[in-house]
Amino acid sequence: MDTLIKKILVPTDFSKGSEKAYIVAANLAKTFGAKVDFLHVIPTLKYFRESVKMMGIPFDMDEDFYPHAQRDAKHKMEQAAQDYLKEEHRGELHSIIEPRTAGGIAQFSEKHAHDLVVMGERGAGETHWLRGSTTERLIRQAKVPVFAVDDSFQIESIKKILVPTDGSHYSLQALKMALSLAVTFEATIELFHVVELYGVSWENVPRQPDHDEETHARVAILSHISALVEKDSGFSGVTFTKKSESEPLSFGFSMNSDTVSVPCELSVARGVSAHYEIEREAVDKADMVVMATHGHSGLAHLILGSTAEKVAQYVKKPVLTVRPEGLE
């Protein structure tokens, strides 16, 4: 399987949450031989600029404030890179002036072809009740995977990764990232599908009211995984095995010249709400969640604004969201 992570972006506001993101990025960089870039977004102070101008104060934002803020940010990023990253993993340091922090990060990561954004859930001054507003907006807008970690996150605590799926090609694209992370964290994977009690029929896992829906869903998803591994170029070199119904699944592939095997299980649950069942499964059995932002046909069930967004907001575990290829 091709290395998915070669270039990592860490947006930073120099808060405690950012420091945790440095540690996670450093571990990922070590595993994948990746470079880590730092980015600090300086918000435009439009109303302050106008107020100063109206009061006649001789203060020019472009000459007196922004250059100083950028120099200070560069110094702090240089220190962070030195403290947390080995020299071979240190990338570029950037500061940009943008009116909207999340939008600036999303555009920057796409323009500079980053493979992953790693950031703290909450920046300075943000509430601990939900994920920070900047992180939440970035998950909505970014076209590259976003890994949100809180300041209590511990690398060594990741032993099981939950990958929610509806059996579609879009939702299973998150599996590629999960496999890479499983190697990094020496973790297992749980694929998780919810049969919604009052849900509609999806072409990937159609409803079977006269049969055991959980068994049918399991067979259908296993079939989709086998087809995906066989046909998707992103799974080149990956083998998918299941010796019997009683034995666990496993994925084998080569990474950094080593042959690795990742144990995997497939769980199917019945419930009224997919996001509720995913949250409960994550809390009870998993240490982090990796999920696609869209499922089904990409449009039939727009998960952001629904399942993935709610999971990203409320689940008290690290969440990595993957925007499937082919979506605008």
Image (spheres, rainbow, N blue to C red):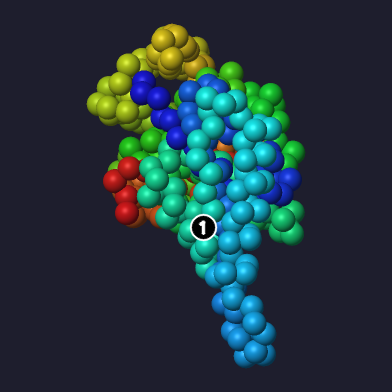
Q: Which residue is mark 1?
A: 96
Q: Is residue 272 visible?
A: no
Q: Picture quarter containing residue 112? A: top left
Residue 272 lies left or right of residue 238; in this view the side is right
Q: Give residue 296's position: percent from left, percent from top.
A: 35, 46
Type of amino acid at the residue the image marks with label 1: Ile
Residue 243 lies left or right of residue 90; in this view the side is left
Give the residue displayed 74% in from the left and 38% down from the top. 152
Q: Give residue 235's position: percent from left, percent from top.
A: 33, 24
Q: Secondary structure at mark 1?
A: strand
Give the residue displayed 62% in from the left and 69% down from the top. 64
Q: Give residue 22's position: percent from left, percent from top.
A: 63, 37
Give the residue displayed 45% in from the left and 35% down from the top. 7
Label 1 Cα crowd, 10 Å radius (few <14 / some 14-19 / many 20+): some
Query: From the image, which quarter does the C terminus lie in?
Result: bottom left
Query: From the image, which quarter does the N terminus lie in?
Result: top left
Residue 174 lies left or right of residue 76; in this view the side is left
Q: Is residue 38 above or below residue 263?
A: below
